[in-house]
Image: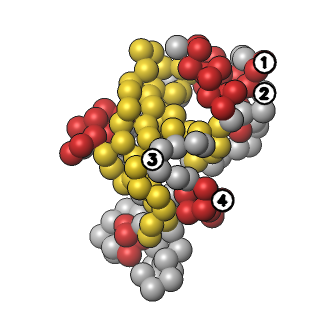
Amino acid sequence: MNYWLMKSEPNEFSIDDLIKQPAQTEHWDGVRNYQARNMMRDEMKIGDRVFFYHSNCDVPGIVGIMEVVKEGYPDFTAFDPDDKHFDPKSDPKQPRWMMVDVKFIKKLSRTISLKELKQQPELTELSLVRRGNRLSIMPVTKQQWDFILSLE
């Protein structure tokens, strides 16, 4: 099993939005970074655990846990000119962008804030706390995962 962190702006799609979806499951669309796309396409597997991270908000941080329930497949929003994630260079015959389906597992009892994560010596190698990292999807080691959960 692999461990991940996936960011979403809560005004776009929050953990509460995921909870409201049928079967508490939704596709994770709109990723438009090649490195993040490659992780979804090549590395994310059914059963992987994912931290749901709220970004670009008053208190950015980890708010819950999800599970990958469908492995990478073409992001159909890239083909829809009426969708905010439309990419005119993406071709359904050779899709440029991918997505996975995720299912809600649990909401944390509190937000584990970015500020708190940055203060932990055990997390200095966590991609999220490194300067200049803007990826919306990033791997988390098992040790980092367990340590972060211990903060809850």
Q: Mark 3 or 1, which is nearer the eye?
A: 3
Q: Residues within 10 Å of mark 3 (few under 14, many from 20)?
A: many
| On screen, residue 17 above or below 119 | below
The residue at which mark 2 appears reads as 124
Q: Are marks 2 and 3 in contact (CB under 8 Å)?
A: no
Mark 3 / mark 1, whichever is N-terminal: 3
Q: Which residue is mark 1?
A: 121
Q: Is residue 79 visible?
A: yes
Q: Disc 1, disc 2: CB below 8 Å?
A: yes
Q: CA distance from mark 2 to mark 3?
A: 26 Å
Disc 2, disc 4: CB below 8 Å? no
Residue 50 location (% of width, % of height):
51, 38
The residue to which callout 3 is attached is 68
Q: Position of residue 14 (x, y in %)?
A: 37, 37
- Residue placed at 72% from the left, 17% from the top? 120
Specify the label residue 35 is tagged with. Answer: 4
Q: Amino acid at mark 3?
A: Val
Q: Quadrant of the N terminus?
A: top right
Mark 2 and mark 4: Cα distance apart in space = 21 Å
Query: In front here: 40 or 13?
Result: 40
